[in-house]
Image (tube, coloured by chain):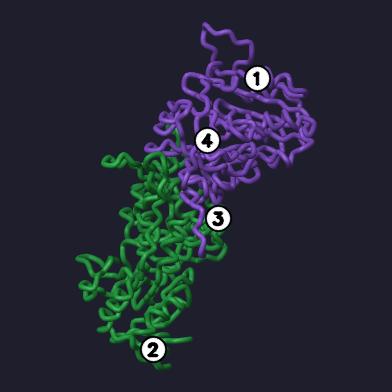
Amino acid sequence: METAFILKREEIPHFSKHIISKGYSLFAPVKGELKHSFKKVNEEQVEEISLDFIRTTMPPLKALLTPPRENLFRIRDGGIEETLPNADGGTVILGVHPCDVNAMNLLERVYTDRPEDPYFEARRKNLVVIALNCKNADEYCFCTSFGTGPSLEEGFDLLLTDLGERFLVEVGSKKGSELVSDFYMPRATSTDILEKDDSIRKVKSSIKRHVNTAGLQKIMAGAIYNPIWSELAGKCTGCGACNMVCPTCFCFNVVDEPELDSGSVLRTRTWDGCLLWEYAEVALGGNFRRDLSARVRQFVNHKMNYWVNQYGSIGCVGCGRCIEQCPAKIDITNVVARLRGETL
Amino acid sequence: MSSKLENPYIPAFARVMSVKDENPTTRTFTLSMVNGEAMRFRPGQFDIVSYFGVGESAFSICSNPDEKNVFENTIRRVGRVTTALFNVKPGDTVGIRGPYGRPWPLEKVTGNDLILIAGGMGLAPLRPVIHYLAKHRELYGSVDILYGARTPSDMIYTYEFDSWRKLPNMRLFLTVDYVPPDMHWQHDVGIVTELLKYVKPRMRYTTVFVCGPEVMMKFTSQLLLRMGFYPSEVFLSLERRMKCGIGKCGHCQIGYKYVCKDGPVFNLEEIGLLPDVIE
């Protein structure tokens, strides 16, 4: 390890203020009534930051880099005004778990595939990621199946590990180094590193949910006509919650919104999902996935099969959100296990 | 990265030069880029046309690929965007992105006989092929165009049929599902695949291009395979919902293929095993 420091837990608000004072917008997890969620915090709100959480409902990096509703451009007086995200100051996100960082790296493959997406690029270039290794997992977590958690080896600017009353802070990039360069923290010792390894070993062994990826693509490809899809369609409500909370679901719709006050038009894009009925609809009432079974099959196959051909790896990071949020209790890990003949 | 990225979502402006009625619900729009640039496309590619304030939709570019100053889109009034576009007048401007997609493999099939099978609006992506073949007639064997529509008045490009028939070694066969009682019709009645009775294919040396409604392509593909055509020599141009044209919005995926960038033209070998496609 290049450089590692120790940051006391009680120093988190102070460190957050330090980040804000450098001109960054800071996004961090705060405790809500039911769950934690990420929000933009100002200097007065830094005490609310809470790093004791397993999973937020919304995937923070997807929501930050490709907001649910994004302006593409404005048409005014016969001309087009590009509405690229403002690059001033930069953004720091604090406390994202390894699965979400890995999901961002997957999204990056989609958006940097030519032609590159300038909106994603502008936001990504401007983003500093302070990741947080997981201290705890719950029954929905299955990141160990894909090597996407519960700890991170790369892809962060800074990486925190919760060691109880203190955090180990590892530096992963120049941007990260700049954040800590003028904030005093003692150097970490080899004991701290051992403690980190121990903590990660513990959380790893607590993760019981699993997807066996060996030969999975072939199994999925051979299961196109498996009756499981119709059976799942009998339970699925087609609500698209899985799509919305999935950190790697990237589909969007494009909508023109006339601005009544100024006579101009905004072209926007909004999150869309393959579970929704309209998703594959075409002119004259045609719909290429009219049947819910085809839409369920698309979701599972895209993550576990098509992603590999399209972008070089499985498109799931095992965050567990789709399982936790499904009103019909459909469990993608169970679907895969059944297709493999591993369970009933 | 220091230089600003080209924004692939921003359309260029095109001016409507002329409008031609094909039938009561279909018009062909001749367009010219306002910035004076040429639309360089290959037969089978598509563009995405914006009516600002309503939205954008994908259409086959249906004109002669050698004509660089103007290009054409044939648009049938079926939904919100197409109804708005249907009503644009000469002098109006629309937004254009593209051309996008993988074209018909014309360069790869030189020397072969060609059969073009179209249903209804499906003639649009094949019209540039016909114009291309007219110019490069000596590079290909016989060309048979089989075109079917619901009724005679649903057919498009009828004003060009005579010139197509006059091309050496090119034949045009027409059929309709139904002829209204008061209408004169001297061609076939029945589904388009029945026109295959007029062709005597040399399977190894024959390439088929098909475009039409999904169900028509499904039955046509099945029949062609039964007749002994090679799956690698039967090409379809597929329609899917598209919101971007550049492999980002996700909508047009069939299995791991994106219709917008891996297609819209595929051969049966490529799509035979994929779901949500002609099964």
- Which residue bears the numbered disc 1? B161
In the rendered structure, the colour chosen for chain B is: purple
Residues at circles 1 and 3 in contact by the CB criterion of under 8 Å: no
Q: In which quarter of the image is residue A144?
A: bottom left
* Tags 3 and 2 on a common chain: yes
* Tags 3 and 4 on a common chain: no
Look at the picture and state if A23 lies above or below B26.
below
* Tags 1 and 4 on a common chain: yes
**Marked residue chain, label 4:** B
Given the image, on which type of amino acid does mark 2 rest? Glu
Given the image, on which type of amino acid does mark 3 rest? Arg
| Element at label 1 | helix
**Marked residue chain, label 3:** A
Q: Give the spatial CA distance, label 2 vs label 1.
A: 80 Å
- Which residue bears the numbered disc 3? A114
**Marked residue chain, label 2:** A
Q: Which of B240 and A298 is in front in this view?
A: B240
In the rendered structure, the colour chosen for chain A is: green
**B54 horizontally vs B226: left or right:** left
Residue at 59% x, 28% y: name it.
B123
Sequence order check: which comes first, mark 1 or mark 4? Answer: 4
**Marked residue chain, label 1:** B
**B86 horizontally vs B117: left or right:** left
Residues at circles 2 and 1 in contact by the CB criterion of under 8 Å: no
Labelled disc at residue A195: 2
Query: In x, y percent, where is residue A122?
Result: 43, 61
Residues at circles 3 and 4 in contact by the CB criterion of under 8 Å: no
Sequence order check: which comes first, mark 3 or mark 2? Answer: 3
